[in-house]
Amino acid sequence: MALPFLESIDAAPAKLSSKDPAPKRMLIMMNNMGFCEETFWPKETGRHKDLSAPLKPLLPIKDKISVLGGLSHPGTIGGHITEESFCNGAKHQNSNHFKQTISIDQVAAKHIGTQTRFSSFSLSNFEQSSLSYNQNGIKVPAITNPVDLYKKLFTQGSQKDIHNQMQRLSLRQSVLDTLRQDYKSLTRQVSKLDQHRLDQYFTSIRQVEKDLDHYKDWLHKPKPNIDIEQPETTNDFFAWLGHMARLIRLAYQTDSGRLCTMFFRLYDYKSWHKYAHHGQDPKNIQQLIQLEQGLMKIYKDIVLDFHETQEGNGTMLDNTMILMGSNLGDPNVHSNKNLPLVLSGGSFKHGQYLDFGKRFNQPIASLYLNMMREMNLPIKTFADISKPLEGLS
């Protein structure tokens, strides 16, 4: 961790019994190519009577989903470049002074992240992309390979591995101790502006120290013992998503973590980008619908997997919110308005299409407030928004 520029100088968690209160969880997935604006939306608001062509695979679970329209991030414009701001609503991507802000999962992690082995998971099918950003606007690196996620969750290292890891953590702590001394020395020499920069830097050091302490606490505790084989590495996106989703369900079921974001980069997958810019060509639109239906089939499988997994007196879906959406409302013209969203799980009233205003959108941050309150987190505002959406509860 380098100094900033200055102008002046695991015991394995047991499965829940029917008497245990189930933890609340969140899974947010984002497709960076959007959905065909002309075909995505249901014809009528209110209770689901039928679903649009891209959403047809969700018919078996239509009573378990809500289609949400009329939502976007105010001030978040720029087409594709808004993709990594889906979970935080950071504004003015085209500005030279643009900076990311903390994402919803990391806000939640500040409150519940220490209760599990892993405070959160950031997953992506593209190494450079992530939906998760910490309180300083720094990207949380994503896991891209299902094999790596499997090992992280369930492979127990040898005693030698644990010893080596503890040594590495101790070395990092020594580096942080040195940086702390540098901080104390520099604060007596710098200007007010640099003092502010150093305070931000020291906040980052404190967070890293907390993370190190958390890792040390879990290092000698055994990981969950599960009876599934390690998944294979795959280049097929839908197979990749299936592997990742099953592993996250297991991570949630063993209470190894409760928060996850998943970034889907689909530019090159089966010419998705070409068909998203369909130019109103019916053939391109039909090809796009088929790709979108493939994605929704996986979403249906994820929802059913959580729904069919018993937890206490209910199911895991009762305690897990699963959001699928995109940063593009109309990929054909790179619009960032009226973003397509499908929500399942939790205690929300599902089985409906809610339109919060296609012309004058409401902030997605309001939905994120609903989700954080569903998790019983004491969050009053997020992305400068303090009012949750009505009609979900």
Image (tube, rainbow, N blue to C red):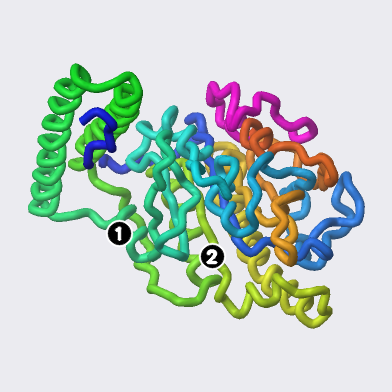
Element type at mark 2: loop
Question: Can residue 88 be seen in the rendering of this structure?
Answer: yes
Q: Which residue is mark 2?
A: 265
Disc marking residue 215: none
* Gap between marks 1 and 2 measured at Cα: 23 Å
Quarter of the rendering occupied by the C terminus: top right
Q: Residue furthest top?
A: 188
In the image, what residue type sits under mark 2? Arg
Between 219 and 266, which is closer to the camera in this rendering? 266
Residue 234 x/y as whole percent: 43, 75
Which of pointers 1 and 2 indicates the residue nearer the eye?
Answer: 2
Q: Which residue is mark 1?
A: 151
Q: Quick check: 195 above or below 170?
A: above
Q: Position of residue 23 (x, y in %)?
A: 49, 34
Q: Residue at x 70, y 44 (%)?
A: 72
Judging depth in this view, the residue of 27 and 305 nearest the camera is 27
Q: Residue at x 38, y 63 (%)?
A: 228
Horizontal relation, residue 46 to residue 12: left or right: right
Assess whether residue 387 is covered by the magenta stretch.
yes
- Percent position (x, y) of residue 208? 27, 35
Q: Amino acid at mark 1?
A: Lys
Question: 48 or 17, which is in the foreground?
Answer: 48
Give the extent of the magenta segment: 371-393
Determine whether the residue tagged by mark 1 lies in a helix, strand or loop: helix
* Quadrant for the N terminus in the image: top left
Is 178 displayed left or right of 16 in the figure? left
For the point 46% across and 60% down, the residue is: 124
At x 52%, y 65%, the residue is 241
Q: Position of residue 188 (x, y in %)?
A: 19, 17
The answer to whether residue 10 is magenta is no
